[in-house]
Image: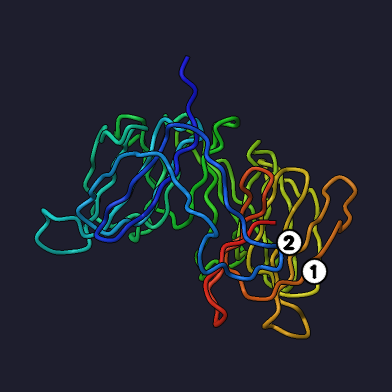
Amino acid sequence: MRKNFPIIVCIASAGVFSACASGPKRMISTPLDHEPIPAAQETVKYCAGWKAAMQGNISYISESADGSRILVSTSSDKGIPKGFEGRLRLLNSSGKVLWSKWLKQPAKSQTISSDGSLIAFSNYEDKLYVLNAQGKVLWEKSHLGTPLIFANHKRIVLFNDDDSDAQMAFTTYDFAGRKIGDVNVPKYSEAIDMHSSTDENIIAIAMRGGRFNAYDVNGKILTEEKIDGEPSAIATNGTAIFTLYSDKTDKNIQIINSYDLLSKKTLWSKKLDRRYEVLRILGNTLMLYGNSVRGQAVSGI
């Protein structure tokens, strides 16, 4: 049986992206002091892959965990005379378009299940759509948010990103579109970022007011913690929760904090020399991305 490797996707201008899927490649990381690197010290060669022209601005690219499917959403594709219409495409690992679907509104967020059999996306009309692998719409809901597919639990978890309903953390539906329930954050706070562990057992929520919570998939609170600053991003690998937050005494300084869910203790904290906006986990590495006066940077810890 052929083993699927992670696909390296490169976004280029004019709605073109390329990918390489022949095998694992070595990764380049920045020094731990997070200084930007202007150029690589040596030439890095990647395998010759494939390219696909999307005829529009690429909004999102999502890959199934098994590497078999790539979901691409674009906006303002050619072929529509006016408006904000976009297109949703599903490709295989060789770059072949399996199907293409016009959208009345561009995708605001999207996700694909680990085996590529289920797709969920939301648009700017506050609609949530769930599709099967053939592109058929299974159901839709009038709901604003960022969807996640929990295949093990057969649920769609929709993280709330609507400022008008600040206390709503997330809503869950089953795969048939039946609503299971809502989870709210405390009245004194507001959910600003959410991340789930790959085993789907932990949902971490960062909140205004210097707080973060961890829940199970049923919405049961596993821990409630306070941090010494305002969080901007959160990530979890199931055993630890990592928060990115502004220093209480100097908002220009950010701190990354590691919290152990088992002992319910902070393991370590580290000050960063620039501001980052995104915190995610890639394998055993924490990935940070930021854009500040000191320049753009991607770092791994």
Q: Can you identify the residue that label 2 sits on?
A: 212
Q: Residue at x 54, y 36 (%)?
A: 155
In the rendered image, which quarter is residue 124 located in?
Answer: bottom left
- From the viewer's side, name the closer residue of 169 and 180: 169
Q: Earlier in the sequence, mark 1 or mark 2?
A: 2
Q: Amino acid at mark 2?
A: Phe
* Percent of width and height locating residue 154: 54, 31
Disc 2 residue crowd, few under 14, some 14–19, many 20+, Cα 10 Å: many
Looking at the image, the residue that sits furthest to the front is 42
Q: Which residue is mark 1?
A: 227
Q: Label 2: state its secondary structure.
A: strand
- Which SS class for mark 1? loop
**Residue at the location (25% across, 35% down)?**
99
Q: Is residue 181 left or right of residue 236?
A: left
x and y, in percent, of residue 260 in the image: 83, 50
Residue 80 vertical placement versus 250 (above, below): above
Q: Which residue is situated farthest in the bottom direction here?
A: 249
Residue 114 seen in this snapshot: no
1 and 2 marks in contact (CB < 8 Å): yes
Residue 111 in percent (x, y) is at 45, 44
Percent of width and height locating residue 249: 78, 85
Quarter of the image with the C terminus in it: bottom right
Residue in the foreground of this view, choosing between 140 and 195: 195
Check disc 1 and give the amino acid type: Ile
Q: Which mark is residue 298?
A: none
Work out whether residue 223 or residue 186 is closer to the camera in this orientation and state it.
223
> In this rendering, does residue 178 appear at all?
yes
